[in-house]
Image: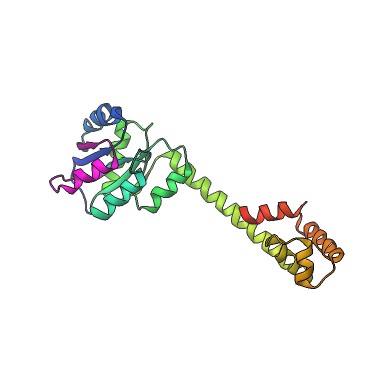
Amino acid sequence: MSEVTPPLRIMIVDDDPLIRTVFAEQIDAQPPVAVVATAADGMTALDLLSRGNLDIDVALVDIDMPGLSGPHTARAIIQNRPGIAVVMFTVFRREDSLRAALAEGVSGFITKDEPPEAVAHALVRAARGEPVMSSRPTELLVEAYRVQQDRSDAVRQAQAAVEKLPPHLQEVHACLLKGLTNKRIATRLNLSQNTVRLYVSDVLRELGYNSRTELMAAYITG
């Protein structure tokens, strides 16, 4: 993205009328930027941009809007007007909205508790092609990464434990993951049901589960 000379031309897309009036005025008062358009929803913003007579450097888009969501609005702006940097504006209550917006290629996330001066400077950085992130989205991103790493470590440990089982118990373990009953396991592996019951107990004990339901739950959530 090329260097942009201030004042940056900003579009604010938010269903909150106070954001489109009071906050927009506060942002417009910051020397680096100028608010040249506001929209109450994603469809209105796209309609304004489609007319071709509106030059925008950065779109500040609310992540939670009725109708066309923030991430979908961001996607449409980025696809149709790739020269516009899109920054999400949010209170960030949900980590899933962070993931959805990241997938659309946004330039960053600014929370609504940031002062106007900080928002203005963040928009300048976004126009220069720099990623911008308030503290709360950063915390969510880091926490999501940690959870994913912990989950990956748990999966690797579980796989290693299964690989240490004797072959006959590995076969029973595979049947348990398919939800087979003892009777069906016995038929499939050509074993007696008494033997299957013993093998199932061995599998659960070796892997540290109290029941086959617990084993299945760990497999699904992993």
Q: Residue furthest right?
A: 194
Residue 183 quadrant? bottom right
Query: Residue 159, can we see it?
Result: yes
Indicate yes or no whether the magenta region holds residue 72: no
Residue 32 position within the rendered picture, expressed as x and y whole percent measured from the top left? 22, 38
* Number of callouts: 0
Asked whether, in this view, residue 92 is left or right of residue 155, the answer is left
**In the rendered view, would you say 115 is above or below 71?**
above
Q: Is residue 130 left or right of residue 155?
A: left
Could you tell me residue 92's position as x and y percent? 43, 38
Residue 161 in the image: state x and y as whole percent: 72, 62
Residue 21 vertical placement versus 9 (above, below): above
User: Residue at position x 71%, y 55% from top?
Assistant: 215
Locate residue 97: give its quadrant. top left
Does residue 35 belong to the magenta stretch? Answer: yes
172 relative position to 25: left or right: right
Q: Residue furthest left?
A: 53
**What's the magenta region?**
34-58
Residues 3 and 217: in front is 217
Residue 50 higher or lower than 203, as above or below: above
- Colour theme: rainbow
Image quarter hosting the N terminus = bottom left
Q: Quadrant of the C terminus?
A: bottom right
Residue placed at 19% from the left, 43% from the top? Answer: 48
- Which quarter of the picture shows residue 163? bottom right
Q: Measured along the vertical axis of the image, is residue 207 above or below residue 124?
A: below
Judging depth in this view, the residue of 169 and 23 nearest the camera is 169
Along the line of sight, which residue is nearer the eye, 222 or 42? 42
Q: Quick check: can you spot residue 1?
A: no
